[in-house]
Amino acid sequence: MNENKKKGILVLPAVILVALATQIPLIITVYNSMIRWIIVRPDLSKKFIGSQYYKKIFTSDEFWLVFQNTMVLTVISLAACLALGTLLAFLLHRQFTGVGIVRTLLISPFFLMDSVIGVFWRNVMLNPSFGLLYYFYKFFSLTPPDMLAEAPLFFIIILVIWKWTPFFMLVLLAGLQSIPEEVLEAAVVDGANAWNKTIYVILPMVMKYITISLLLGLIFILKTFGLVFTTTRGGPGFASTNFPYYVYRIAFLGWNVGKSSAIAVVIIIISLAIILVLFKLLRKTITEVEV
Amino acid sequence: MIKKILVLLVILATIATASLAKNVTLTIATVNNPDMKIMESLSSQFTKETGIKLSWVILPENELRQKITEDVALGAGKFDIVTIGIIEVKNWVNYGWITPLDPFFTDMDTTAKKAYDLDDVLQSVREGLSAKGQLYALPFYGETSITYYRKDLFEKAGLTMPKEPSWNQILDFATKLHDPDNGFYGLCLRGLPGWGENMAVFGTMINAFGGRWYDMDWNAQFDTPEMKNAFEFYNTLIKEVSEPGATGVGFTEGLTLMAQGKAGIWYDASVGAGLLNDPSQSKVVGKLGYARAPYAKKHNNGWLWSWSLAMESASKHKKEAFKFLTWVTSKDYINLVGETKSWVNAPSGSRKSTYENPKYQKVADFAPLVLSAMRAVDYNHPSILPTPYIGTPFVVFPEWPHLGSEVAQQLAATIAGKKTIDEALKACQKIANEVAEEGGYKQ
C-alpha cells in the first residue's frame, strides 16, 4: 500500500466523525424545512409541503430587512474592527512603561461573555433612568437618548466592535511581531520613510494575518446572537434582527420548526457564498502582494 | 433457606426504595419575581419536613416561558414542576402536557385534605386553572392589573383619582405630574416587547377601547378604528408622559421605578403592592393610593392572571411534586411568609382566607380593591364585541406566544419611531390573519 493511501486510511475515522457530526444535522434541517411542523400544535400533524416556506421567505419584507441588517452589521463591524485593531496593534508594537497592563485592559472585552456585555451595557451604562449615560447627560442638563429604541442596530454594531477589536489587535500584533528587524532596517537604509515603510513593507508582510482576522471575524460576527438577545431582542419590530436571531424568533417564539429550518438553510447558503467570495478576493490580494 | 433469602431480598428492596425516595430531587422552573424568590428562600423548610430536595431554575418571564414550552412540548421532562398561567393550562391540557391533580387530591388522607382546604382557593382562579372538569394547577398567587398612584402628590396637586379612572383621566393626571427634567415621570407603563410584558398592559387597553383581536370568523381586527385608537393612545402615553427608554421597561423595571419614587402613576400587576409597601425595598411606603384598571368604552378591564404551579406529565416524581405543590400553596405557607418575611409580602390573589386574615388586612390596604377587581373580571368575554376566543389580556390559543410576540414588537416599533402606527397596524393585520389561517381557525 502506498504512503498516501496509508495516510488516507489513518485519517478516515476522523473524517467520517466530522462528516457525520456536521452533515447529518444539515440533512435533517433541509428535510425539516420542507415539513409543516408547529411544536405547540401537535394536533396539526406534520405534513410535507415542499418549497412553500422558501417561497414565503423570499417574498417577505421581514427577510430582506433582516438580510440588510446582517450585511450592515457585518460590513461596518469588520471594517471598524480592522481599522481600530490595526491602529492599536501599531500602538502596542513598542516598548513603554505599563505596556503589559495596557495590553491586558485592551484585550479584556474579548474574553467577556456576550450575555455579560449585553446586560452590562443595557442596564449599567445605557439605561436612560438609572444608567451612567443618564447621569452623564443630566450633568449637562440634557435628555439622554434611548439608544436601544432609537438606534438599535447601531448599538449592536458598537457592542460587536467593542468585543471583537481586541481579537483583530491580537492577530495583527502577532503579525507585526513576526516581521524580521533586518527587513525594516534594510528599508530604512534604502531611504523609506515611516509611511513608505508601513505601506510597502509592513502591510504586505502582515497581509496573511489580515486575511485570517477578516475571515475569522466574518464567521464570528455573522453568528452574533447573544448581544442581540440580551439587549434589543431584535427589535423594535425587526430593526435589529440579524440572521441568527431571526431563526431563533421563528423557532422559539413561533415554535415553527419547518419555517425556521428553511430560514437556516437559506442563511447557510448566503453565509457560505459570502465567505467564499471574501476568501477568493483575499487570496487574489495575497498572491498579487507576493508577486 | 430460600424463604430467608426471599425475606432478605424484600427487606433490601424496601430499604433501597426508601433511600431512593429520600434521594428525590424535584426540579422547579419559576419566574424571577419577588414572591418566587421568597418561595426559593423558604423552601429549605419543605426539604427539612419531607427529605425531598429541590433544584431551582429561575428565569425572567420571557425566557421562562420559552424553556418550559420547549420542555413540555418535546416531552423532555427536565422539569418536574413548572410555573405557568391560566393560558397555558387552557392550551396544554388538550395535548396532555400537564397532569390533572384531582386523582392526587382523591388519594390525600382526610386530615391533609381538610388542612389544605381546596374550597378556600378563589373560585375564579380555580376555574381558570381547570379544564375538562379537572384541576390542573394550583395558584401560587393571583393578580389583576390596577392603577397605583402617589396620593401625596395627588393631594399636593389638588387631584382626585376616582375608583375606576378613564384613560383620558390618567393622561390628564400624568401630564400634570410629569417632570422629566428632574427625573420624575407622570406615568410608568410597560414598553418591553413580549407577549407577557407590554402585551399584558396593551391587551387590556385593546379591550378598554372596544377592540378585539379577531371577529367571530377569525378575521384579524387590526384595521378597525378601535384598534387604531388603542395604538395611538398608548403611543401618546409613552411619548408624552412616561419614563424614557420604555421599550426596556417590563414589570420588574416598572416596579423599581415606582419603588424608587420616580413615577406618579403606575398601571401594572396588583402583586407589585407587596414590594411597594415593604420599607426595606420601597421609598414610597404609606404614599400610595390604588384604583381599578382604567376604562374607555369598556369597564372592568383588569386582567386575570395567576402564576401557578403544575406538574409536567413527563415528570418521574409526581407524588413528591404534588407534595411540594400543596405545601407551597397551602395556608401554612402563606402564614410562614407572613410571619418570617412580612404580611405585606404574603402571596395573595389565591385564597379567601388570606383576605380574611387580620394580620394581612392590617398591612394590605389595597387588598379589598384587588379582590373586587379580580372578581369583576369576565375571562370568557374579554371584549364588548363577541369574540371566538376567551382570555384577558391574552388570546387563549396555542399560537398566542407567536402572535403576541410579533404584535409586541410592532407596537414597540411605533414607540421607537421605526414604524408609523398605520404601518404597524398593517403588519399586525397580516401576521394575525396568517396565524389564523395556518392554525386552521379561519375557514
Image (cartoon, helix red, strand yellow):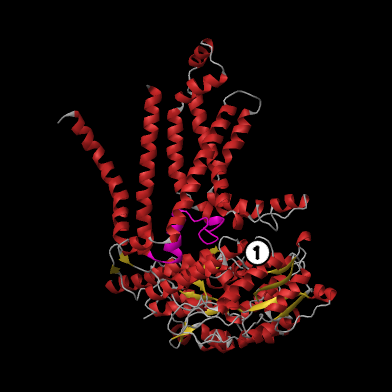
Which quadrant is home to the C terminus of chain B? bottom left
In this picture, is A271 found above or below A48? above
Q: Please name the amino acid that badge 1 sits on.
A: Glu
The residue that disc 1 covers is B253
Please count the marks in the image.
1
Closest to the observer, B250 or A7: B250
Name the spot of residue B75 as percent of width and height, x first.
38, 69
Is A245 within the magenta?
yes
Q: Is residue A162 left or right of residue A33?
A: right
Closest to the observer, B46 or B277: B277
In this picture, is A15 found above or below B34? above
In this picture, is B141 found above or below B70? below
Name the spot of residue A210 as percent of width and height, x first.
46, 32
Which quadrant is home to the N terminus of chain B? bottom left
Can residue B17 be seen?
Answer: yes
Q: Quadrant of residue A107?
A: top right
Magenta part of the chain: A229-256
